[in-house]
Image (cartoon, grey):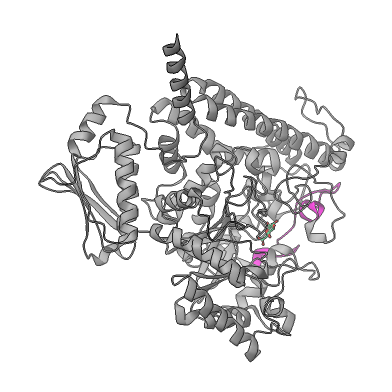
């Protein structure tokens, strides 16, 4: 009897240990279930020779051994003459400072080489990925170098641990117990990033507190930098332009004032004493109320160059954001960043990079690429994308973002090639918090994963675009079973377009509720600034709907090269998915499908909801193939998504119907509430805002 109880307890605790709560992300390293393959792997990998003389190599070696032990269930020997994985530093200019090669040799060994420790680190993770994906390893010939040098996560984490636009709990950084308490999660965060090639992290919110630059906080940042360093991740900080006044006791932050320049120089020296490989500063200036050089009648270039000079002796960079717009200017918000930055091309110091959001408004479910890409040939640019789903249903909605990123990266600027060819790197606004599963939604982990993978291999025919990246992620996160992979992949690949359909179809944008941006609010018209009002963006009236950005309207179109312009300029030939971004058209406008605009709008909103239900059915069918804990997590979030999609559809169609004055499609599900009900449905205390 006693024995049975003991056995029961033992099994229970084993279960608890193996709980599938999502913590392990895509680095699971579970024993390979396919017996034949496991045997093959074991006989191909009897030994590992890996001299590790630096902290980075030691971290790489430890990862490799942990991975192999988990996947193969045995510990390889540390010496051997064949069937051995040999890891070796070996100068090869073709591999650069981050690339690696993995080859099978004529003696049937596997040779992993790189010119640098970092290359070895990335090579180790690549090798482990091969095993996790159950790829053959007996004839390897892989060479890999990153397409872009800067692959950075931007955390919008406040120093009080609230995360602006964060939907996965509090900030991962427990600032209060830093620098002494070093949570294991910091290391696991670094491992996850290194596994996908992310090489930089901005620790704090772009709406920056000046205190980040005080000695106490710098010490905390330095302790994180120490943990991340062996994983090839440099730390950057967001800085507030007025810091010399806020914490430095100066009367001005004028970038041309000698005392201000001196203050920044000294601050940079102080930072580099603590963090010798500090990456640099990220700056949001003269945007949404943040201070900046324009407060002193200076330009963005004046401000950026002052900081650049302070960082230059230490090889640091300034990342200056082009996300600027002002409601005092009558100009269409979509035009303003180009208007301000284009004339500054060529005026920035060489260690300044200008960071441009993927589209000209703000991380919408769909936007055309930003007109600055390709338009600043003398200024290195970074692309900024948002992993946290501020305008895409937070961490409650399943939306795989890689197709959105890919749409932008592959867009032809008609100036200097595709967007991916005009940039030096990508910054992703992180979707990570202290939730046990890191991202809130298990599938939001795929957006973190895809971001890193795209930054490593963007552009070029061989790029592992969205679908291939989804396959990688599913195999490492869930299973190697082909039918299951296919089914999950279909859901992921369709999910972005589904979201566009139930939120902002046909080129609509920014019609979300105020401030938190969750749920519909197309009727809103009372914001403190006109350009925060949904009515500013859709311009619906009885004649039609859409924002005329052609020559008869704001002419934002003129900021693009003629080749790019041509695809959107004419309402009759403009692809349906962009129509209302560029044109104000009548409710009876004939779409490419042959339907009227009103009919097409209805069809899209209904299809969006139906497709969320389709995702629910797919997920239900997958139940036997997924562990109960993660299955349930996703299932419950899909239920939230369905409810929310219905709300989007009903609220938007009822509202737009007051202008179109046309009926909803016959036989379609009727809205279960009135427009008034949706207007009154205000969400209080939504996550991600400061209220
Ligand atoms: C907007 C967010 C806001 C950010 C801003 C930015 O609503 O919270 O501060 O972008 O990127 O999307 O600076």
| Nearest the eye: 14 or 229 | 14
Res. 103 in view = yes
Magenta stretch containing residue 100, yes or no?
A: no
Residue 513: x %, y % from top left? 78, 47
Q: Quadrant of the N terminus?
A: top left
Res. 592 in view = no
Magenta stretch containing residue 540, yes or no?
A: yes
* Rendered-image quarter of ligand 1: bottom right
| Nearest the eye: 298 or 676 | 298
Residue 383, picture quadrant: bottom right
Q: Is residue 567 left or right of residue 36?
A: right
What's the residue at 73%, 65% (across, down)?
288
**Magenta stretch bounds:** 533-558
Residue 96: x %, y % from top left? 31, 65
- Magenta segment's dominant SS is loop
Extreme-right residue of the structure: 676
């Amino acid at each position: 009897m006693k024995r049975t109880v003991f056995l029961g307890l033992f099994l229970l605790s084993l279960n608890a240990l193996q709980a599938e709560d999502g913590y392990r992300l895509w680095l699971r390293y579970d024993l390979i279930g396919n017996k034949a393959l496991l045997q093959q792997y074991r006989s191909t990998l009897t030994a590992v020779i890996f001299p590790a003389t630096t902290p980075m190599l030691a971290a790489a070696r430890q990862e490799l051994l942990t991975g192999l032990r988990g996947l193969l269930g045995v510990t390889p020997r540390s010496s051997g003459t064949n069937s051995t994985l040999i890891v070796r530093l070996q100068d090869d200019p073709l591999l650069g400072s981050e690339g690696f090669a993995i080859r099978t040799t004529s003696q049937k060994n596997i040779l992993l080489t790189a010119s640098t420790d970092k290359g070895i680190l990335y090579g180790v993770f690549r090798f482990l990925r091969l095993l996790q994906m159950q790829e053959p390893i007996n004839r390897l010939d892989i060479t890999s170098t990153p397409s872009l040098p800067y692959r950075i996560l931007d955390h919008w984490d406040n120093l009080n641990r609230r995360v602006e636009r964060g939907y996965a709990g509090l900030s991962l950084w427990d600032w209060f117990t830093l620098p002494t308490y070093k949570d294991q999660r910091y290391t696991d965060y670094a491992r996850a990033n290194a596994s996908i090639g992310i090489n930089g992290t901005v620790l704090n919110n772009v709406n920056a507190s000046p205190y980040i630059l005080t000695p106490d906080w710098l010490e905390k940042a330095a302790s994180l930098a120490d943990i991340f360093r062996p994983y090839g991740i440099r730390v950057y900080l967001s800085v507030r332009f007025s810091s010399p006044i806020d914490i430095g006791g100066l009367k001005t932050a004028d970038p041309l004032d000698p005392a201000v320049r001196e203050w920044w120089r000294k601050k940079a020296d102080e930072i580099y004493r603590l963090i010798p490989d500090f990456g640099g500063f990220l700056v949001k200036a003269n945007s949404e109320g943040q201070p900046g050089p324009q407060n002193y009648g200076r330009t963005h270039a004046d401000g950026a160059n002052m900081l650049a000079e302070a960082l230059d002796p230490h090889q640091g960079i300034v990342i200056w954001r082009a996300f600027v717009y002002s409601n005092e200017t009558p100009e269409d918000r979509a035009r303003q960043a180009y208007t301000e930055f284009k004339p500054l091309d060529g005026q920035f110091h060489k260690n300044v990079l200008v960071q441009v959001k993927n589209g000209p408004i703000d991380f919408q479910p769909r936007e055309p690429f930003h007109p600055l890409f390709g338009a600043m040939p003398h200024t290195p640019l970074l692309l900024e994308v948002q992993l946290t789903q501020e305008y895409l249903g937070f961490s409650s909605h399943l939306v795989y973002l890689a197709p959105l990123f890919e749409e932008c990266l592959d867009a032809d600027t008609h100036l200097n090639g595709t967007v991916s060819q005009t940039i030096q790197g990508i910054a992703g606004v992180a979707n990570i918090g202290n939730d046990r599963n890191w991202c809130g939604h298990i599938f939001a982990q795929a957006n973190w994963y895809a971001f890193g993978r795209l930054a490593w291999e963007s552009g070029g025919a061989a790029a592992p675009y969205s679908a291939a990246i989804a396959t990688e992620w599913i195999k490492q996160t869930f299973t190697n079973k082909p039918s299951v992979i296919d089914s999950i992949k279909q859901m992921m690949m369709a999910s972005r377009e589904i979201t566009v359909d139930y939120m902002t179809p046909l080129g609509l944008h920014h019609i979300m509720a105020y401030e938190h941006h969750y749920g519909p609010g197309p009727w809103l018209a009372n914001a403190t600034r006109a350009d925060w009002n949904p009515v500013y963006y859709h311009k619906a009236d009885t004649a039609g709907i859409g924002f005329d950005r052609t020559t008869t309207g704001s002419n934002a179109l003129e900021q693009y090269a003629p080749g790019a312009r041509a695809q959107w300029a004419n309402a009759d030939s403009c692809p349906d998915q962009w129509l209302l971004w560029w044109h104000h058209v009548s409710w009876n406008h004939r779409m490419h499908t042959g339907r009227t605009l009103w009919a097409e709008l209805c069809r899209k909103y209904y299809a969006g909801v139906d497709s969320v239900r389709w995702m629910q059915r797919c997920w239900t069918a997958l139940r036997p193939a997924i562990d109960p804990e993660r299955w349930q997590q996703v299932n419950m979030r899909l239920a939230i998504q369905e409810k929310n999609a219905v709300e989007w559809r009903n609220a938007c169609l009822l509202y737009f119907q007051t202008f179109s004055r046309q009926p909803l499609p016959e036989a379609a599900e009727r809205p279960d509430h009135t427009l008034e009900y949706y207007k009154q449905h205000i969400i209080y205390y939504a996550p991600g805002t400061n209220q």
